[in-house]
Amino acid sequence: MEKLIIEASEQSNRITVPSIEDPQKLKSFLNNDMDLIFTDLNTANTKIDLTKLTTKPTCVIIGPEGDFSEQEREEILKFNGVQSVKINENILRSETAVISALSIINYAIN
């Protein structure tokens, strides 16, 4: 996996190589110090507020197949400074949602 990430980074002229971290429980994940963008099918918001982004790492959270449970969604929305954004009117497969969300967010930030 690491070899693929390095090759993809080189191919796209990235200066830094992204890291893939070990899976973790949602509660543990939400204890990180980050700017959080939540791709939420249940929000009407379609814009990222760039003024809410800080110098902290920006993290995007995308639901699993079948989406988050309502309890998980509520936990995510309680995160301090979370931005809930609808990236598409259609339900996307998880791997497609990742590509779509990162493309939208990268475009907005850069």
Image (cartoon, rainbow, N blue to C red):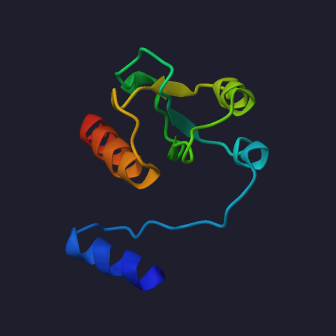
x, y percent for residue 106: 30, 44
State whether residue 15 is above or below residue 56. below
Q: Quadrant of the C terminus?
A: top left
On screen, residue 98 above or below 83 = below
Q: Quadrant of residue 89?
A: top left
Establish if 37 lies above or below 5: above
Count of marks placed on residues:
0
Q: In screen coordinates, is 14 left or right of 95?
A: left
What residue occupies the far top of the structure in this picture? 44
Which residue is more in the foreground, 28 or 89? Answer: 89
Residue 7 x %, y %: 31, 81
Residue at the bottom extreme? 3
- Residue at 41% in and 26% down: 86
Across and down, in percent, residue 41 comes to 47, 27
Q: Splitting the image into 4 quarters, where does residue 85 fall?
A: top left
Q: Is residue 79 left or right of residue 18?
A: right
Q: Name the residue at 68% across, 33% down.
A: 69
Tell me: 26 left or right of 11: right
Tell me which residue sits at (48%, 18%) in the image: 43
